[in-house]
Image: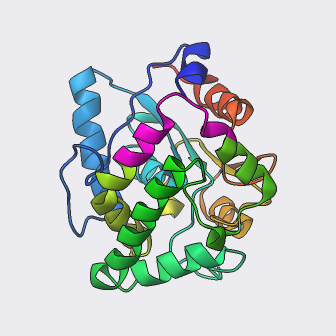
Amino acid sequence: MLRVAERHDVDLLVLERPGYGTSSRWPGRLIADVVGDVVLVADSCGWDSFAVWGGSGGGPHALACAALLSERVERCASVVGPAPFEAEGLDWFEGMSPGNVEELTLAAKGEKAYRPLVERLAREAVEAVREGGLPLSDDYELPASDVAALRERLADPGYLERTIAANVHGVDGWIDDCIAMTSPWGIDLARVTVPVSIWYGPADVLCPPAHAEWLLAHIPGAERHQLPSGHILGDNELDAIYQWLVSHAGG
């Protein structure tokens, strides 16, 4: 991430959403609620305008910024991110891996049903990476390209420490993110006016391509960008995303 940001000479600001890292929890938050945090942080940096992007569960939050901050957001990229849970005409779980279906089905039922699973998955992720394995179990049935990309990341400096931090100090954020994702988002995507790009992998089983197709059909003027394979991004994919974000940005 940092290498790519440096290559494109961008000031990259990554927010810990509520409940992750040292960010305090915000139980019951909606996707739209995070926009207020983005405004506060952007103001503190003195940024009048900026581009936003989010990957996976970050995609809906980036789209919320595009929907609610049109006077400041210049461009928005939703990358391997889902469509709204109540999306009309979309079979939300079709093509999704069994592990993800189990997770998000329980998230839709609320914290009491969902928390035990997340706490177990978090423990297993840390244990697996400590032993040189992958943080996701076989239940997620990732394509070979995603497995290879995750294995490559195991060798990155600090990968174990980041995995521990995410799964020890980020469980509340994980829970609240997925509950918010499977609840009404609090935004109207049909009213988005800023340039939006939708990036998806044809082999993605965590966020199937049908989600991208729905977003493309319901966000005015949204641009289609197909990635080479699945859910995990490599340097080439990140390069393409940043190139799109900065190609017409003025801030």
Q: Is residue 23 left or right of residue 155?
A: left
Q: Quadrant of the C terminus?
A: top left
Residue 159 lies, in percent from the top left, at 50, 37
* Quadrant in the picture for residue 109: bottom left
In which image quadrant can residue 202 be found? bottom right
Q: Where is residue 243 shown, x and y percent of the image?
A: 66, 26
Question: Measured from the top left, where is residue 136 in percent x and y?
Answer: 57, 61
Residue 71 position within the rendered picture, expressed as x and y whole percent measured from the top left: 38, 37
Q: What residue is at 51 percent from the left and 70 percent from the top?
A: 84
Residue at the spot x=74%, y=31% of the render?
Answer: 236
- 50 with respect to 55 (left or right): left
**What is the magenta segment's predominant secondary structure?**
helix
**Residue 225 shows in this picture:** no
Instruction: Using the image, determine if residue 58 lies above or below residue 236.
Output: below
Decide whether residue 48 is among the magenta residues: no
Q: Residue at x 28, y 62 (%)?
A: 172
User: Could you say which is closer to the camera, residue 101 or residue 15?
Assistant: 101
Eyeballing the image, is 65 above or below 40? below
Q: Which residues are magenta?
A: 152-165
Query: Relative to 29, is 250 on the left or the right?
Result: right
User: 50 or 130, which is in the foreground?
Assistant: 130
26 sits to left or right of 235: left
